Structure formats: C-alpha cells, structure tokens
Amino acid sequence: MRLKLITSGLAAATLLLSSCSTPKNITYFPELNNGSIVRAERILEIKVKPEDKLSIMVNTQDPALSALFNLIQVQNRLSTTTSATSNSGSAASNGNGQTSYYTVDSSGDINFPVIGKLHIAGMTREQIAEYIYDQLVSRDLVKDPIVTVEFANTGISIIGEVASPGRYEFNRDHMTIIDAIAMAGDLNINGMRENILVLRKLGEGRQEAYRVNLLNARELASSPVYYLQQDDVIYVAPNDKMKRETTPNGNTPYTPSFWISMGTAALTIVTLILTLTR
C-alpha cells in the first residue's frame, strides 16, 4: 500500500511537470479591451540636429530667380524622404528640379545662398520652411516663394531579436516604435517584449537610454521614445530561453522529457529502497 501511494504521487508529479504551461510575456497590450483608448502624452516632431542632411528648394514664378537660391544638383535624392512646404499665393514650379543636400554643421547652422548663415538646429521641417520664407520676403528678395524642406537621413537602426534587423529610412513624421518594429518584421518569438532598449542620440558622442514595455500600451505611449527621432537605435534583447541556448544543455531542465526522466529515475530509486528495506 505504501509503495502504491508513493508510486501514484510520483506519477502525478511527473505528469504535472511535463504538461504544457501557458506562454507568458508574448501577447502585446493584453490589458486593452474593446473600446480602450490610449493617448500619447505628447506628439514628438522630428527636429534638426547637427550632421543632418536637408534638401531645401525655393520655387518662384521666375526660374532664373529660383536658381539663385537652389544648390546645384550633385546627387539623386533618396527615394524615402520627408517634406514640408511653405508658400504664398500661386507660384510656378520648376518641374522636376531638385537641389542637393545641405549638411547641418556642428553649431546647427547652414549657409543658405544669398541669405547667408541660418541657425536651424532644433527646428521642424515646417519651421525651417517658414523661417526661410520669412527671410526671403522680409529682405524683399522674393515676393511669392514656395519653400520645400526635406530630410534626407531620417533613419533608425533596429537590431536584436527581430525578423529583419537593419537600418530603415522612414518617410513621414510621427513614426512610432510600433511602426518601426513592424518595418523590421516584428519581434521573434524569443524577443524580450517587456524590456526593449532605445538609444537616442544627444550629440557630442552622447546617447540617452530608455526602456519600453510592449506589454503595456499606456506605459509605452507615455514614453519619450514612443515617437522616434532620426538615428534612434532599437535593441530587442533575447529572453531567458534564448540566453540559455548559448550554453550546452542550457534549456534541458525546462523540457518535459527531462522531468519525465527525473521522475522515472526517482521512482526507480524509491522502489529499490523500499524493496531493500522490507
């Protein structure tokens, strides 16, 4: 009778240990229900930083006058850029004319034709377009300009446990971290969803680190890195299971077959002890 009870207990324990448990930390935003509202604390615009590259084009009714304010084309514009336009009245377009890039210097300035040095660091595309428009009009250089500003290097890097790591260019403002992860093909099943690292460039070789949690929509929306900036780096770390796989037999104790073997061995030992002590 005693042997039968021990045997039954060990068999039950083995079955429990070998049964499949419900995966955790996999589903995004499990707290959201039908009709839930998630609001970001603030919408973050992309702003100019040193070393950014910009395309700035001025169009007027006179093509010859427009040419005074546009750089000579030296390379093709990237196919994925963001643009903003400031205009007054109806102005003629120069068709397919394109300008080359301005590179923002370490002080946050560009040297604009005719006008001279302009400080644009910290401005959005729309603010730059309006600033140049005001400069042209206030100096009586052009009466009806159309100023178009495009970012040429709004790229982010996504590395770690995603389907397609790499550098991605994006063609619009208000790019969220969810959009970025979607571009990289989503996280792998072994990616750590609750502790994603985002590195944001501050300048002068400095980066600021943030941690975000994809399992909590409201916490994510309140993060300063919910909206991405150019040159942000997103790193998805591997979960504990993936880390254990880097060592020999690292995940063996977590497999059903391991516990079945342990239960069988324990059962054999108990049976042997009881047999010898009769």
Image (cartoon, rainbow, N blue to C red):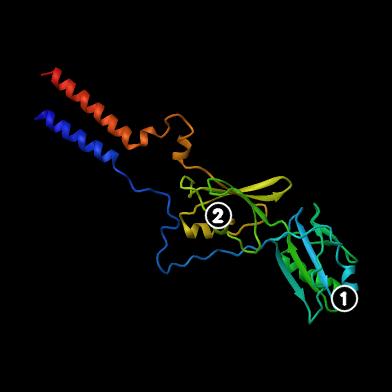
- Residue at the far left: name it: 1
Residue found 74% across the figure and 68% down from its top = 127
Residue 202 lies, with reference to residue 10, above or below; the image says below
Dot 2: element: helix
Residue found 42% across the figure and 69% down from its top = 35
- Residue at the far top: name it: 276
Residue found 54% across the figure and 64% down from its top = 40
Mark earlier in primary sequence (1, 2): 1
Q: What is the x, y in percent for residue 234?
A: 59, 49
Residue at the spot of label 2: 181
Q: What is the x, y in percent for residue 143?
A: 86, 79
Residue at the spot of label 1: 142
Q: Is residue 167 left or right of residue 160?
A: right
Q: What is the x, y in percent for residue 148?
A: 77, 69
Q: Is residue 141 left or right of residue 165?
A: right
Quadrant showing the N terminus:
top left
Q: Hey, what amino acid is under mark 1?
A: Val
Dot 1: element: loop
Image quadrant in which you'd find residue 87: bottom right
Q: How many marks?
A: 2
The CA span between labels 1 and 2 is 44 Å
